[in-house]
Structure formats: C-alpha cells, structure tokens
C-alpha cells in the first residue's frame, strides 16, 4: 500500500545542553558499572560476561563503560519496518515520527454505546481496521486484550487477528519465547522464509524488564530470540517515578537508561548490528492515590529527557502519544492526548504508541485514535516548516494589490493554495459558523470522531490474507494453544 | 453522450477549473456547433458555477478557486451576450453592493459581489463607507433591482435601516430587494429593519438573491 511521506519536523524542541546529556549518560554508566543489575537468565549472564561484564559475589551483573560503548557502536541508528506486503513503511531513526496504538487494554470505551466494558478479540480487529483506514496511523499494536479467551496462546491469536485486519506494520507483545516463537513463525510464513523476514521486518517486539534493575528470564529469552531472528526489539523498562525509580526526573532517566542499555549490551553481543530500539516509559506514581499515571506532568518531563537522550545516543526511540488519564471522552482527553502528541512531534520521537489509551492505560477509545489522527495531520503541517523564499515573501504581490485591494482573486493566492503549501482542511474540527454548525447536526468533536470510526467499521472487512497462509498460521496458533501452559516460560 | 452534450461538459469542466481560455474556446465551438446560447448559459456556465458553489460548501475547493471560476464564467458570458435575448442576458438582475457609512471593512462585501457576479448578476460595487444617499441615488440611476449592504460593526448597522427608510421616502422601496449581511448582522435584525433577505456568508447570499429574483 501507499504510505504517507515520511514526516520529519523542521521545528524542534530541545532542552538539554550537551554537558547535561553527557552527565546523565555518565551517571547511567556508573549505575551499570557500580550498582549492577539482576539478570535471571543463565545464557544471558554468560553472554554479558563475554561482553566484558562481571558477576559479583552478590550475583549482580556489572557492565563496564567499554561494553556499553561497543554495543552503541554496533547498534544501527535506524532500521525499517515493512508492511504486510513487504514494502518499506517506517524508517525508525533520526527525527522520523510515526504513530500507532498500544497493547493489552482490559477495557473499551464502547463505540456504539459509550459503556465501559471488557475488551474482546473482536476489538483487536476493530482497532486494526480503524488504523488501516487512518492515514496518520502508521502501525498497529493490539489495542485490546481478549478477556474472553483462554490466556494460552492469546498473543499469537492477537497477532494473527491484527495481520488479518491490517496491512500496516505491527508492534507486538508476547508472554515468553514460546509464543514469540509462534509469532515469528507466522511472520516467517508471511515472508516465505527466515532470511526474507530478516531483510524486511514486519513487526517490532516490545519487551519490558522490571524496574528497578531486574531482568527476568522471560525478558532476556525474548530479547535473545529477537536478536537471533533479526526481529526489531524495543527493550523498554517502565520505572514509576518515586516508586520503582528515584522521584527526580534525572534519577528516573538515569536508572531507566541503565536498564535499557544492559539490554542493548546483551542484544548486540548476541547479534551485532541487529535492530534495537531504545526507550524508558514515563510513568509516575500519584503520591496521593497510589495510581500510576500516564499523563502526569512529571511523566512528560521524564519523556522529554528520555527522547533527547535517545537522539544523543543515536538510537531509534520508543515513544508515546495520543493518550490520557481521563475516564471520559472529554476536554482532559483532548488536552493530554494533544500535548503528548505534539511533544512527540516536536521531539522527533520515532515510534509513538498508546494512541487511544484512556484511564491510565486500561481503557481503549477508537474516538481518541480518530481524533489523534486528525491532530497529527494538522501538526505535520505546522511543524513541516515555514517556507520563506521570494514567492513566500510576496513583495511583488503586495505591490500589485496595493492599499485597499484584496488578494482573493490574485493568482498568487490561488497558485499557492493549489500547487503550493495549500491550506490544511480538517475532517473533524469545526470551521463552521453557528448556524451552519447547527444545520449540520450540531455535533461535537467526540461525536464526529465516533461517527467517523463507525463509518470505517461499517465497510466490509478486507480479510484478504492468502488462504494457505491463514491455514499455516492457524495451525501454529492451534499447536501453541494445545502445548503451552498458562504462565509457563 | 452526444457531441453537443460533450461540448457543454467541456465548458462546465473549464469553468470549474477556472481557466478563461478553455471556457471561451468551448463557448465558441458550442456556438459554431449551433447550440442555443441560452442552453450554453444555463447548462454550461450557470450549471458550472452552481457546481463550484457546492464544491466550496463541501470544502473541496477554496474561495479563490470560486473567484477564478467566476472570472472564467464571465469570459464565456461575454461571448454569449450578443446571442442572448435581453431577458436571458439580464436574467439575474443588477445589484448595488457596498459597506455602509462609517465602516471600512469590505473583504466580505467584495466576496459577495464577486460571487453574485459569478452567478450572473450585474454587480455595481460602491466600495466602503457608503452613505444612504449614495446607495439610493445609484439604484435610481442604474435601475438596479437589488441592494446589498454590509456592516461589520454594530455601530454602523443603523445605516442599513436608514437606507431602507430613504428608499421608502423616495417611493422606491417596493422596486428593490434589499439584502443585508456582515458579522454582527442577524436574520432577526434583517427582519426588524424590514430587509428582504439576510445571508450568513457569500455562497448563501447568492442563493438568497436568486430566491428573490
């Protein structure tokens, strides 16, 4: 399929000096070298030792500066996800900005009824279909956890559902190396071979170690499996400010970076040059309610710092956009989803997930996905830059029109609108006067977004996966479901 | 589609594109093919402007595109005029437009004038800062059947009422359909001062004026 032109903001946000960035990095190196980390995977520990790390009497792995620097130098500064059909779709790196949904939401803000209800498998198909239709949603992450299913093999079912309903690249989670293996198997079937999948990666796997400084066996197993298969992987801790990380922004980032960079060292030791994504989630513990927040302002501060560090490290980064702590389709949702999305764009954050998240990452809203798509479109215009050449300065045009004239019929106006930068037109935001707005039904943004999502879903699903491929994938899912045990590694 | 229908379609397409030269070429060929001038006007030029108006309403074109279409339409109309009966060539009527005395905001009024012109009205634009007497005298001199007054300030709106009163005093009110508009002007205000029509924007102004013909 056709993908929109790559978006790179020309208007950018930066807030750290070179010296500050170096101090943050040096502090992370000290944590890695002096404090160390718990790595609960024998082969992982062995590989880290090969990479120059030491294991202390306390069992903790300590990572020297040289190991980190070697991993940094072998890790690619960008890699490309390809769509289902094998075409390049997202070059992750630099200041390229992409958007998509998040995973594993237990609840949905129901599009038809507005009720708060448990997520179902069908919701994953709906998220995928809505993202397929929206021009500024670049990838799909499940958007729902199918609560009605037996947990065995659930992520493989999730993957196949996304693949059937969307042609854009996917971002996935897996429970362990067994279901991740089945998912890689399905992607291999799609591509027609292991090497073909390596050349044209179809999905990125998200793996989350446990803060503080703990790397469970299944995380390491998934990380190594991705390295072996050449599947891009984001190794992203989610320290909670003041609970599982220091309460200070800088301390949060220092620890989170140390956790992520240990993953980088291990990953690059296993497969130098394999695609790796850097990131630290921005979570904050609300110190009154005890509720983890996605959009507390302190989280934004963490985020700004982490993304800037990713640019400094020259690694593709994991980002977040289009989400809110609000429990309702309200102004708070608009404010928070908008601010986070705009920050991501200003930062040039690469892979921005969680679009459509409400209520602390527990509830999904397709209206919010649709609204964010529109918000991204208008800000691509804003941040695309402001041209100032002779045509734009328009002195001749001003001279021609002169005092008391008007520009409506001047060729400059028309040419500019038609062939030049044009004027961005909203599909949802209101530009009507009151009478016209009333005449058109008097709908607010929320309702317009709801109707747009419903209209997308009213179309017949494509479901155009090759029947032989589908059969092969279903067999992999069936085998996984029959053999795996809940919670096994 | 017959050859004649294809020729008319070409004219419609050229007007929508807003290119005068293809419009005049199309009109010339249509006349040479023996198509009735009124058919060219109604099914070609006027239908095209109606289509452009709809496209603007749907957000598919911009205001400058409509103005270019209007200019292209006028270029075609100039070729048709010698072939049209008086009734057909002046079917829409003559309209005097202006921004009222004390008010210098005229971009909205300009746009209304251009749109009316595109819809086939003969438009006499008096500019801005226009006194009641000037409106009324011009209507009398030019035999205009329409008056379009614009005000952007609540303080200048009363000039609209004053102009209508002057028309009444001169015994001309029944011969003139008066339209009012501008950001602070409402249908209620139009009713209150006894205007014949009000429109929220330029495209609606054309529709209201046409309803009053």
Image (tube, grey):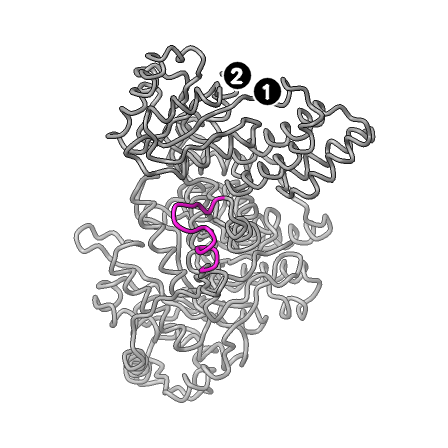
CB within 8 Å, label 2 to label 1: yes
Residue B161 highlighted magenta (yes or no): no
Q: Give the residue at x 41% y 73%.
A: A311
Q: Position of residue A26 (x, y in %)?
A: 30, 83
Q: Residue at x 42, y 49 (%)?
A: A375
Parent chain of label 2? B
Mark 1, Cα crowd under 10 Å, few <14 / some 14-19 / many 20+, is: few
Magenta stretch in the rendered image: A395-408
Q: CA distance from mark 2 to mark 1?
A: 8 Å
| Residue lying at 41% horizontally and 62% vertically, measured from the top left | A319
Residue A194 placement (x, y as % from top left): 66, 68
Q: Is residue A4 depicted above or below B173 in this figure?
A: below
Image coordinates for residue B105, horizontal then vertical, percent: 34, 38
Residue linked to disc 1: B91
Q: Earlier in the sequence, mark 2 or mark 1?
A: 1
| Res B190 → quadrant | top left
Q: Give whichever of A459, A269 is nearer the camera.
A: A459
Point 68% across, 59% down: residue: A189
Secondary structure beneath label 1: loop
Residue B213, labelled with which disc? 2
Q: Is residue A24 above or below residue B38?
A: below
For label 2, the SS is loop
Please count the marks in the image.
Answer: 2
């Amino acid at each position: 399929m056709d993908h929109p032109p790559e978006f790179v903001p020309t208007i950018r946000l930066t807030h750290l000096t070179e010296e500050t960035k170096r101090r943050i990095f040096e502090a992370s190196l000290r944590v890695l070298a002096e404090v160390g980390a718990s790595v609960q995977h024998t082969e992982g520990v062995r590989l880290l030792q090969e990479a120059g790390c030491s294991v202390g009497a306390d069992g903790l792995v300590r990572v020297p500066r040289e190991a980190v620097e070697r991993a940094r130098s072998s890790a690619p500064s960008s890699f490309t996800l390809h769509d289902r059909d094998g075409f390049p779709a997202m070059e992750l790196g630099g200041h390229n900005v992409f958007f998509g949904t998040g995973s594993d939401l237990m609840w949905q803000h129901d599009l038809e009824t507005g009720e708060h209800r448990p997520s179902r498998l069908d919701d994953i198909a709906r998220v995928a279909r809505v993202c397929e239709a929206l021009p500024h949603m670049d990838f799909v992450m499940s958007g729902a956890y199918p609560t009605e299913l037996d947990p065995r093999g659930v992520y493989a079912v999730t993957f196949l559902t996304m693949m059937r309903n969307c042609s854009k690249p996917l971002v996935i989670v897996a429970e362990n190396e067994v279901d991740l293996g089945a998912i890689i198997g399905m992607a291999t079937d799609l591509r027609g071979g292991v090497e073909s999948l390596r050349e044209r990666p179809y999905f990125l796997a998200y793996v989350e170690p446990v803060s503080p400084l703990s790397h469970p066996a299944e995380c390491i197993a998934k990380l190594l499996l991705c390295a072996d298969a050449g599947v891009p992987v984001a190794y992203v801790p989610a320290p909670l400010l003041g609970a599982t990380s220091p309460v200070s922004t800088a301390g949060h980032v220092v620890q989170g970076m140390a956790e992520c960079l240990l993953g980088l060292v291990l990953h690059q030791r296993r497969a130098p040059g394999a695609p790796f994504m850097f990131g630290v989630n921005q979570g904050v513990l609300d110190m009154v309610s005890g509720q983890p927040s996605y959009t507390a302002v302190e989280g934004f501060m963490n985020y700004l710092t982490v993304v800037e560090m990713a640019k400094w490290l020259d690694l593709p980064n994991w980002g977040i956009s289009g989400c809110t702590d609000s429990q309702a389709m309200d102004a708070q949702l608009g404010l928070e989803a908008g601010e986070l999305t705009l920050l991501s764009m200003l930062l040039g954050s690469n892979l921005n997930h969680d679009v459509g998240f409400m209520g602390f990452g527990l509830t999904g809203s397709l209206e919010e996905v649709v609204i964010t798509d529109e918000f991204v479109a208008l800000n691509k215009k804003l941040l695309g830059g402001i041209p100032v050449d002779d045509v734009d300065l328009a002195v001749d045009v001003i001279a021609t029109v002169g005092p008391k004239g008007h520009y409506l019929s001047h060729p400059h106006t028309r040419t500019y609108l038609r062939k030049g930068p044009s004027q961005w037109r909203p599909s949802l935001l209101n530009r009507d006067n009151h009478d016209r707005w009333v005449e058109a039904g008097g709908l607010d943004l929320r309702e317009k977004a709801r109707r747009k999502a419903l209209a997308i879903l009213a179309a017949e699903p494509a479901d155009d996966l090759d029947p032989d491929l589908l059969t092969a994938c279903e067999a992999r899912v069936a085998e996984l479901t029959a053999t795996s045990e809940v919670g096994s590694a | 589609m017959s050859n004649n229908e294809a020729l008319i379609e070409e004219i419609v397409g050229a007007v929508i594109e807003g290119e005068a030269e293809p419009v005049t070429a199309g009109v010339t060929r249509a006349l040479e093919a023996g198509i009735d001038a009124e058919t060219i006007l109604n099914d070609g030029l006027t239908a095209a402007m109606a289509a452009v108006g709809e496209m603007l309403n749907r957000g598919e074109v911009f205001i400058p595109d409509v103005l270019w279409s209007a200019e292209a339409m006028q270029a075609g109309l100039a070729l048709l005029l010698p072939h049209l009966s008086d009734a057909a060539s002046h079917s829409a009527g003559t309209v005097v437009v202006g921004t009222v005395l004390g008010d210098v905001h005229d971009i909205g009024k300009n746009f209304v004038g251009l749109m009316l012109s595109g819809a086939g009205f003969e438009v006499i634009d008096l500019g801005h800062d226009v006194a009641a007497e000037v409106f009324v005298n011009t209507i009398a001199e030019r035999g205009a059947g329409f008056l379009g007054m614009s005000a952007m300030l609540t303080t200048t709106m009363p000039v609209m009422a004053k102009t209508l009163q002057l028309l009444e005093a001169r015994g001309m009110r029944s011969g003139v359909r008066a339209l009012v508009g501008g950001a602070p002007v409402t249908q209620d205000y139009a009713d209150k001062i006894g205007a014949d029509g009000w429109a929220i924007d330029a495209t609606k102004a054309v529709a209201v004026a046409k309803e009053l013909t």
